[in-house]
Image (cartoon, grey):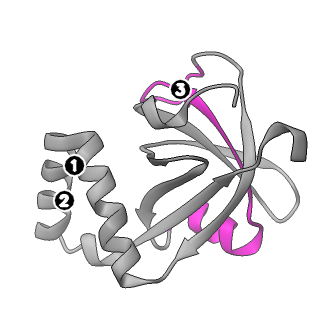
């Protein structure tokens, strides 16, 4: 591991369009041991790109997406559909982001966006397997 995604507040999630072009998005990330999670609006571009191509990369960044250093971890991504697993994943976000997550969830529930979220499971592949 080149960096520890579990301790980063934001990571840049790079997903890939059908033509191979990379699209980077700063996101919150929760999880550990090579398995990490991101949540997003289910109709967001990153979710659509993951449906078409499970390849992804992550790198530490600030909230605007500016890289802290150009160190990327590569792997795969998939959409989580198991409702029990999704609840466990939300607990990971609650533990890591505390009041920010509670505030975000409160606002999302008020405007109806909470039920339209997708959870992405990101699996970082060790460098020796890349």
Which region is colored magenta? 44-67
Residue at 68% of width from left, 65% of height from top? 49
Residue 130 visible within the image: no
Q: Position of residue 70 (x, y in %)?
A: 71, 20
Q: In which quadrant of the rendered image does the N terminus lie?
A: top right
Q: Is residue 20 above or below residue 72?
A: below
Q: Is residue 51 visible?
A: yes
Identify residue for label 1: 101
* Gap in angstroms between the C-alphas marked 1 and 3: 19 Å
Q: Which mark is residue 105?
A: 2
Quick check: marks 1 and 2 in contact, CB under 8 Å?
yes
Residue 53 lies in the magenta stretch: yes
Left or right of 11, for residue 104: left
Q: Indicate which disc, 1 or 3, sits on the residue closer to the N terminus.
A: 3
Instruction: Report how far apart the C-alphas of labels 2 and 3 lie in the structure.
Output: 23 Å
Taking the spot 88% from the left edge, 60% from the top edge, the residue there is: 19
Image quarter of residue 123: bottom right
């Amino acid at each position: 591991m080149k960096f520890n995604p579990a301790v980063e507040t934001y990571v840049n999630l790079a997903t890939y369009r059908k033509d191979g072009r990379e699209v980077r998005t700063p996101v919150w990330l929760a999880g550990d041991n090579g398995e990490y999670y991101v949540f997003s609006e289910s109709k967001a571009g990153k979710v659509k790109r993951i449906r078409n191509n499970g390849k992804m990369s992550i790198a530490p960044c600030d909230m605007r997406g500016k890289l802290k250093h150009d160190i990327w971890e590569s792997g795969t991504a998939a959409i989580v559909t198991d409702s029990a697993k999704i609840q466990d994943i939300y607990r990971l976000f609650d533990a890591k982001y505390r009041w920010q997550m509670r505030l975000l969830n409160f606002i999302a529930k008020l405007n109806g966006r909470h039920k339209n979220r997708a959870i992405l499971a990101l699996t970082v592949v060790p460098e020796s397997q890349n």
